Image (cartoon, rainbow, N blue to C red):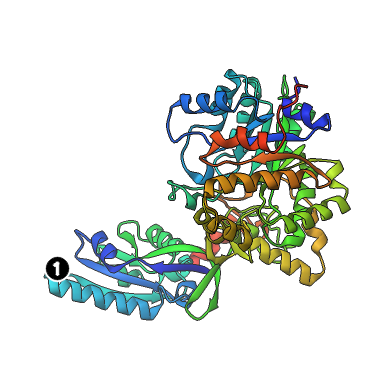
């Protein structure tokens, strides 16, 4: 899932300069699970903004809505009536959701209420860890099911480096060394032989370095006829 | 032309290398003065590459200053600051300017330095870097296969840290560096000699000491505080308590630090498979000649 955290309220207030009527939009997917942008966070932020408006005499109109999934046009399209009349959307969805909103409502300014951080998982309640580097060329089969791109501070393909000590990374005694984890995972699986094989320089074309990525599933793409038939329905 | 370091190592004599930290300035004279002072005390000198991620005079430029003084450089090159394009270009540039030795390193994370907000590169790691540079040298091709009209002349080094974890993997990582193209290895500073000896016995068990030149690293201590700092704050360093105590109880800690370093060098030379000594006198480079002399490693051979 996508892990994000809310921007501090003063930063959000700064972004709102010049706006009068705003819709706070949340998402019930990933950002709800990481307690950043679900229904509850939407209502807390909305209330905080109303208080700010009352205190400063801003005269803001603050409304709220929480979508099922803010990264899909179908769901984002359903809030059209709610959006109407507002001059700003404060997105408490991830950066993907915020962009889909901007695409669907091009005349309204979409402001990011969250800082989108990474692809990760809840470690325990309230703690979320980055897990996947999204490099487009997965090597988990070679690394004991632990991603070296995301979980090594240097994204090394042949770690651990000389800064790994007592299972910790050189950058911080609280950060586990990703390659130490890989080593022990491979040890448990009985595949330490994989630690012996040098992994050559990676082809980063399938990562962000190759430019914005697009995946086409040909069999799923609608033909122009199918599209117009769907539109008519 | 073969590097002096390569000649000394292949002659079977105990090599000596030492480290020069380029200044945090555009002043070449600092490097020039050190090079003049240190000339003749080691076979080649490492020029560190923005060590601990602090912006410094570039290692290649510092290496050229050394060459101008008739001192052989080992240019350190980290994967932190350059992608494979810059890395190969710098290796060609270094070779073109007469630099023969390049030490391939992952590099300290940028969080230690004065550019904490920087984006690191790590397009390749030190093992990938060795693969790139060896391909250029041996096959006359850049990565991907385009031909070089003139291949760089390089003697390739890598680092090994027997004090990092997991300990059992350290010899495996050394083997990977050999397989990737390392001709010589410089180790992290050795204070825990027992652990180093255990590592060396693993190295010998795999026969790696016959395939690569291992140069054992030492760092003279100035005070027990420095020792404590390295023990507690530098990840991947082990400083046993008896060393800290010895420094603490010394009447003249600096003198004691030099004496201890000399003792370590004498002992390390006796370990089978150690082909050289690397002296890292950080911000204390002027002491290198006396350390090397006291250790009985002067004069340096002319090969």
Which is nearer the eye, B211 or B123?
A: B211
Q: Is residue A156 left or right of residue B6?
A: left
Q: Is residue A187 above or below residue B287?
A: below
Residue located at (40% from left, 73% from top): A37
Res. B144 visible in picture: no
Q: Viewed as shown, does residue B290 lie left or right of B13?
A: left
Q: Looking at the image, which is closer to me, A133 or B260?
A: B260
> Quadrant location of the N terminus of chain A?
bottom right
Q: Is residue A63 left or right of residue B46?
A: left
Count of labels in the image: 1
Looking at the image, residue B103 lies above or below residue B153: below
| Residue A147 horizontal/vertical position (percent) | 65, 62
Is residue B125 visible in the rendered structure shown here? yes
SS state under label 1: loop
Nearer to me, B36 or A81: B36
Q: Residue furthest front?
A: B251
Q: Quadrant of residue B138?
A: top right
- Between B106 and B51, the one nearer to me in the picture: B51
In the rendered view, would you say B285 is above or below A123?
Answer: above
Q: Position of residue B133 (x, y in %)?
A: 71, 34
Residue shown at 21% from the left, 62% from the top: A19
Query: Which residue is farthest left?
Result: A57
Q: Residue at x 34, y 56 (%)?
A: A106
Chain assignment, label 1: A
- The residue pinned by badge 1 equals A58
- In percent of width and height, residue B64 lies at 57, 23
Q: Residues within 10 Å of mark 1 (few under 14, many from 20)?
A: some
């Amino acid at each position: 899932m996508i892990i994000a955290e809310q921007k501090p309220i003063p930063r959000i207030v700064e972004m709102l300069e010049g706006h009068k009527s705003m819709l706070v939009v949340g998402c019930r997917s990933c950002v709800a699970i990481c307690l950043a942008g679900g229904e509850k966070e939407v209502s807390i932020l909305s209330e905080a903004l109303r208080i700010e408006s009352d205190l400063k005499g801003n005269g803001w109109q603050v409304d709220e809505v929480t979508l099922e999934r803010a990264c899909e046009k179908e769901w984002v399209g359903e809030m059209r009536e709610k959006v109407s009349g507002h001059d700003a959307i404060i997105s408490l969805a991830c950066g993907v959701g915020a962009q889909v909103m901007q695409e669907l409502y091009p005349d309204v300014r979409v402001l990011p209420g969250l800082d989108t951080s990474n692809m990760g998982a809840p470690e325990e309640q309230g703690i979320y860890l980055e897990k996947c580097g999204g490099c487009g060329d997965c090597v988990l089969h070679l690394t004991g099911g632990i991603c070296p791109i995301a979980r090594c501070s240097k994204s090394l393909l042949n770690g651990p480096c000389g800064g790994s000590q007592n299972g910790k990374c050189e950058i911080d005694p609280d950060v586990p060394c990703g390659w130490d984890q890989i080593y022990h995972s491979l040890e448990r699986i009985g595949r330490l032989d994989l630690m012996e094989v040098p992994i050559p320089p990676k082809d980063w074309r399938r990562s962000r370095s190759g430019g914005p990525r697009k995946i086409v599933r040909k069999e799923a793409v609608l033909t122009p006829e199918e599209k117009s038939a769907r539109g008519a329905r | 032309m073969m590097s002096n370091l390569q000649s000394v190592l292949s002659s079977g004599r105990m090599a000596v290398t030492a480290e020069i930290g380029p200044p945090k300035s555009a002043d070449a004279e600092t490097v020039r003065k050190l090079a003049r002072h240190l000339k003749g005390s080691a076979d080649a000198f490492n020029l560190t590459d923005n060590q601990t991620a602090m912006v410094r005079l570039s290692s290649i430029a510092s290496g050229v200053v050394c060459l101008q003084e008739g001192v052989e450089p080992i240019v350190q090159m980290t994967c932190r600051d350059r992608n494979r394009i810059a890395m190969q270009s710098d290796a060609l540039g270094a070779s073109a300017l007469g630099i023969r030795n390049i030490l391939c390193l992952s590099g300290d994370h940028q969080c230690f330095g004065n550019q904490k907000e920087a984006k690191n590169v790590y397009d390749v790691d030190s093992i990938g870097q060795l693969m790139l540079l060896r391909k250029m040298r041996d096959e006359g091709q850049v990565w991907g296969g385009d031909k070089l009209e003139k291949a760089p002349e390089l003697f390739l080094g890598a680092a090994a840290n027997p004090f990092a974890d997991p300990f059992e993997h350290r010899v495996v990582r050394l083997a990977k560096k050999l397989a990737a193209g390392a001709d010589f290895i410089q180790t992290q500073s050795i204070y825990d000699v027992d652990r180093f000896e255990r590592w060396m016995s693993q190295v010998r068990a795999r026969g790696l000491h016959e395939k690569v030149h291992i140069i054992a690293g030492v760092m003279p201590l100035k005070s027990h505080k420095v020792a404590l700092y390295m023990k507690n704050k530098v990840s991947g360093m082990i400083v046993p308590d008896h060393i800290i105590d010895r420094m603490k109880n010394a009447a003249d800690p600096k003198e004691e630090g030099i004496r201890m370093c000399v003792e370590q060098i004498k002992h390390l030379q006796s370990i089978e498979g150690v082909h050289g000594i690397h002296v890292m006198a950080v911000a204390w480079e002027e002491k290198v000649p006396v350390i090397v002399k006291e250790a009985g490693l002067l004069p340096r051979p002319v090969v």
